[in-house]
Each structure stands twice: as structure tokens, then as C-alpha cells.
Image (cartoon, grey):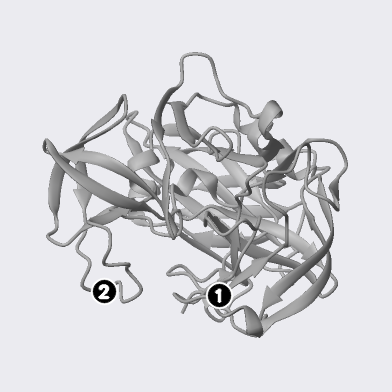
């Protein structure tokens, strides 16, 4: 089931929509941006801070919850909403008791559809930030490639898949691009070409709109920073760039003496951890004593895990060199423990 929230906004507005501010451009931190999964950000409402997945819809709202069909009679008033530096005076939401759990034990309260006739939306995974802006403040890098964004109830783009024209629905809530028959394909949209895009099938997508040939999911954008500008009816992409871990983690404004807000010391397979903030997720890269790179790991610590502790890493990580590459105050849940280590 797909839940969502919406903040009402009139279309074709000059400047920011009424009730949005301050200013004409806003940023917000992303949770787990390096995982290349669904785009997730924290938003604060009267009930507290919750995580929301971000997406796009064409209905003239900035955010909209849906379950595969439009059900406006089931919306409830949220009150003021804060998303990073953006404050909205009044919002409405679909039943907040509905919660969506992702595959790796982090709870997502709903879906925020980040698009409006007067706004642009973008994200930079390496910096760990997303942004919204009025059309005249849209952040479009010099030399960015682009393609046309079209609408038929939902946002879509006309692509050439192995040279054959296909209308692909844009879905930032789906980590996979999809066609009726799964397979790897060359995809060209406008002046953007990707080789070997791994398309999944559509059998397990009951909400798919059959007017389209498939879905353009997040995996198509994995190597890019992205800007979606509804005013220009364009999607812009530019190559990702390397960002220092300390600069990426600074998006949370955590006052800690060590990068990642934890001291890590590895002795053989045992990692000694001294948290400097809880709750906490720390993502770290690892290199064997011989210089081989190992898959990154994440360390999740809940609010009850503030004291120093030790955990065992898999055998191949014994005496590895560890380097923190990201951190956030939104850890995943651990099974029957206040802290755990898992593949990232």
C-alpha cells in the first residue's frame, strides 16, 4: 500500500506558493543517500518528526499521498509542516496511521510528492541533500543533459529502449525501471543515454497504469544529480561528484568531536564503539590489510545505546582499515538489540 501526504498549492504561481517560506529556495537533508534507494527525508509536523519518501505527481500539489487511486475524501489536516529550511503553514495528509516499512527495517510514514507548477525539485546523493525552489531559482548545472517531461494523469517520458519508442511513467518511489518483460536494455531519452539498464518486470506492480509501456525508476538516475523543473517541463541530469564525508555529514548539524559522531576502533574482528550521539546510523567503508576494498557496512544504534559497546564484524573484516563515509540520526531497527552491524 502506498500512503502519502499533500500540501495544497495553486498552479501557475509567480514566486513561491502561498504559505511557503521563507524565501524562494529551500534545502533538506536526505536519509541514506549513498544507498541509491528511495529518496527519504525527515519532515516535522505537530506529532513530531517522521520520515517520508519523496516522489512526483501531476495534480498541482506539492505533496500528495495516494494508494494507487485518488482518494481526497480521506485527507486529514496536518497543520504546519517543516521540511529542512522550508516551512509550510498548512498541509493535509492521508491517514498517518498507515506506515510503510522498507525492506531494511526503517519505517516510512508516507509519500511526499515533491512537485508543483511553480517549483523545481532536485537531489544530490553525494552531498546528501534535496532541494525545492521557484522556477527562477532552479539549480541547473552548466552542461546538464535533459529530456522532456510529459503528463497523462502521471508524469512520463518518451524513451527509446533498444531503439523502440516507449512511454515510461516516472516513478521515484520505485528503485527499478520496469517493462512488461524483464531484461537489460539501452535507453535513450532526449540527449541522455544509459547502457545496460536492468529492467524488472511488471507482474508485482498492481497499481501500474496500463496506458504506459513501463516505469522509469530510480536506477536510471543512479549516476546523476537530478533536477525536475515542471515550469520548463524538463528533467535535467548531471554527473555525480565526490564529496568529503565530513561535508556530507554536516547536513545534520550534529555537534560531535569525531566524523560520524562515533569513535570506532577495530581489534581483529571486534569493533569497539563509543557513540557521541544517539540514535545514530554510521556507514563506513573498509579496506583489508592487503589493500582490497570490502563492501561498506552500517552500524545502527538506537536511543538506548549511548554507552560504549563492542560488536563482532564478519571474518573478512578482521584488522581492516575503517573510514566513516556517512552518518545520520535515523538508524534502522535492530533485532532484539540496541545496536547492530549490517551490510550497507
Query: Where on the picture, by quarter, is residue 68?
Result: bottom left
Q: Is residue 259 visible?
A: no
Please, is residue 317 above or below residue 112 in the view?
above
Q: Nearer the viewer, residue 82 or 140?
A: 140
Q: Nearer the viewer, residue 305 or 60?
A: 60
SS under mark 2: loop
Residue 295, position as x, y percentages in the image: 36, 45
**Which residue sits at x=47%, y=34%?**
234
Query: Quick check: 88 left or right of 163?
Result: right
Around disc 2, counting alpha carbons within 10 Å, would you say few (fewer than 14), some (14 to 19), or many (20 or more)? few
The residue indicated by pointer 2 is 204
Question: Marks 1/2: CA distance?
Answer: 18 Å
**Label at residue 3:** 1
Q: Is residue 137 visible?
A: yes
Residue 11, position as x, y percentages in the image: 67, 50
**Label at residue 248:** none
Query: Where on the picture, by quarter, is residue 53?
Result: bottom right
Please, is residue 205 above or below residue 201 in the view?
below
Q: Nearer the viewer, residue 250 or 135?
A: 135
**Which residue sits at x=20%, y=48%?**
198
Amino acid at each position: 500500500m502506498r500512503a502519502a501526504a499533500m500540501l495544497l498549492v495553486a498552479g501557475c504561481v509567480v514566486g513561491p506558493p502561498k504559505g511557503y517560506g521563507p524565501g524562494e529556495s529551500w534545502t533538506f537533508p536526505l536519509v541514506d543517500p549513498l544507498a541509491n534507494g528511495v529518496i527519504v527525508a525527515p519532515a516535522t509536523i505537530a506529532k513530531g518528526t517522521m520520515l517520508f519518501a519523496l516522489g512526483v505527481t501531476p495534480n498541482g500539489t506539492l505533496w500528495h499521498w495516494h494508494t494507487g487511486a485518488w482518494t481526497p475524501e480521506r485527507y486529514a489536516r496536518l497543520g504546519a509542516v517543516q521540511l529542512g529550511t522550508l516551512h509550510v503553514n498548512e498541509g493535509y495528509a492521508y491517514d498517518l496511521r498507515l506506515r510503510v516499512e522498507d525492506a531494511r527495517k526503517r519505517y516510512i510514514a508516507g509519500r511526499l510528492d515533491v512537485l508543483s507548477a511553480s517549483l523545481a525539485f532536485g537531489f544530490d546523493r553525494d552531498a546528501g541533500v534535496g532541494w525545492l525552489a521557484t522556477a527562477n531559482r532552479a539549480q541547473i548545472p552548466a552542461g546538464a543533459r535533459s529530456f522532456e517531461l510529459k503528463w497523462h494523469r502521471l508524469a512520463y517520458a518518451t524513451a527509446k529502449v533498444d531503439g523502440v519508442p516507449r512511454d515510461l511513467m516516472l516513478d521515484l518511489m520505485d528503485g527499478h525501471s520496469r517493462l512488461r518483460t524483464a531484461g537489460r536494455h539501452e535507453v535513450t531519452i532526449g540527449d541522455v543515454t544509459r547502457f545496460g539498464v536492468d529492467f524488472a518486470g511488471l507482474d508485482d506492480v498492481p497499481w501500474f497504469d496500463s496506458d504506459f509501456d513501463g516505469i522509469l525508476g530510480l536506477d536510471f538516475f543512479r549516476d546523476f544529480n537530478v533536477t525536475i523543473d515542471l515550469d520548463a517541463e524538463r528533467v535535467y541530469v548531471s554527473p555525480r561528484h565526490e564529496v568529503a564525508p565530513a561535508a556530507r555529514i554536516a547536513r545534520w548539524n550534529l555537534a560531535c568531536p569525531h566524523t560520524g559522531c562515533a569513535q570506532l576502533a577495530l581489534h581483529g574482528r571486534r569493533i569497539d564503539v563509543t557513540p557521541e550521539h544517539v540514535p545514530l546510523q554510521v556507514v563506513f567503508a573498509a579496506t583489508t590489510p592487503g589493500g582490497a576494498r570490502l563492501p561498506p557496512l552500517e552500524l545502527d544504534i538506537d536511543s538506548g545505546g549511548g554507552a560504549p559497546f563492542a560488536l563482532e564484524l564478519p571474518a573478512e573484516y578482521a584488522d581492516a582499515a575503517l573510514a566513516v563515509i556517512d552518518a545520520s540520526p535515523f538508524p534502522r531497527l535492530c533485532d532484539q538489540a540496541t545496536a547492530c552491524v549490517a551490510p550497507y
